[in-house]
Image (cartoon, helix red, strand yellow):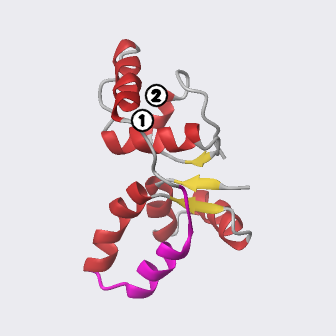
Amino acid sequence: MTVLVDTSIWIEYFNGKSESLDKVDYLLENNYAAINGVILTELLPTIIRKRQTDLSFLLQQIKRVDVAFRWETLVQYQVKNYERGINSVGISDLIILNDTLENDIPILVRDKHFDLMEKGYKFKRF
C-alpha cells in the first residue's frame, strides 16, 4: 500500500498534533508513506532555512510518487472546480490531486480545498 501524505498533515505531524501522529507513524513504520516533489517543495525551504538537516534528509528518503501531468488536465480540473463554485484551488493542490487520481492511491490530507473537491473527484482518503 502507498498513501500520499499531504503537506497539511506533515505540518501537523511536525507540530505534534495528535490527530495525525498515529496515522503518520503507522504509514512510516510500514513504509506506506509517500511524498511527491510538490509536497517536498512546500516543506523543504523552511526545514532547510531552520538548518534541520536530519529532517530534510529523512523526508527525501520517503517513497516518491512521480509528478506526471499535462497542463491541459490541470486546466480541466480547474474548470470543473469553477463550475462547482470552487474558486480558490492553487496549482500545487491540483498537481497533488492529479497524482492521487493518476496513481490511484489514497491521500492523507487535512486541507479545505480537498474537502471542497471531494464531491467532484473520486480520490480516496486514508
Q: Residues within 10 Å of mark 1 (few under 14, many from 20)?
A: some
Q: Residue at x 48, y 28 (%)?
A: 117
Residue 39 position by quadrant: bottom left
Q: Is residue 3 above or below residue 49?
A: above
Q: Is residue 5 above or below residue 83?
A: below
Verify whether residue 41 appears in magenta: no
Callout 1: SS: helix
Q: Residue at x 49, y 73 (%)?
A: 59
Give the residues in magenta. Answer: 50-65
Q: Is residue 1 above or below residue 69?
A: below
Residue 88 position by quadrant: top left
**Horizontal and vertical percent for residue 62?**
56, 70
The residue under label 2 is 116
**Horizontal and vertical percent for residue 15?**
45, 68
Q: Is residue 86 left or right of residue 57?
A: left
Q: Residue at x 35, y 19 (%)?
A: 79
Which of the labelled discs sits on residue 11, or is there none?
A: none
**Horizontal and vertical percent for residue 36?**
47, 57
Q: Which quadrant: the N terminus?
A: bottom right
Question: How many marks overall?
Answer: 2
Q: Amino acid at mark 2?
A: Leu
Q: Is residue 39 above or below residue 98?
A: below
Q: Amino acid at mark 1?
A: His
Q: Residues within 10 Å of mark 2 (few under 14, many from 20)?
A: some
**Horizontal and vertical percent for residue 37?**
41, 59
Residue occupying the far left of the picture: 49
Is label 2 in contact with label 1 (beta carbons under 8 Å)? yes
The residue under label 1 is 113
Residue occupying the far top of the picture: 83
Callout 2: SS: helix
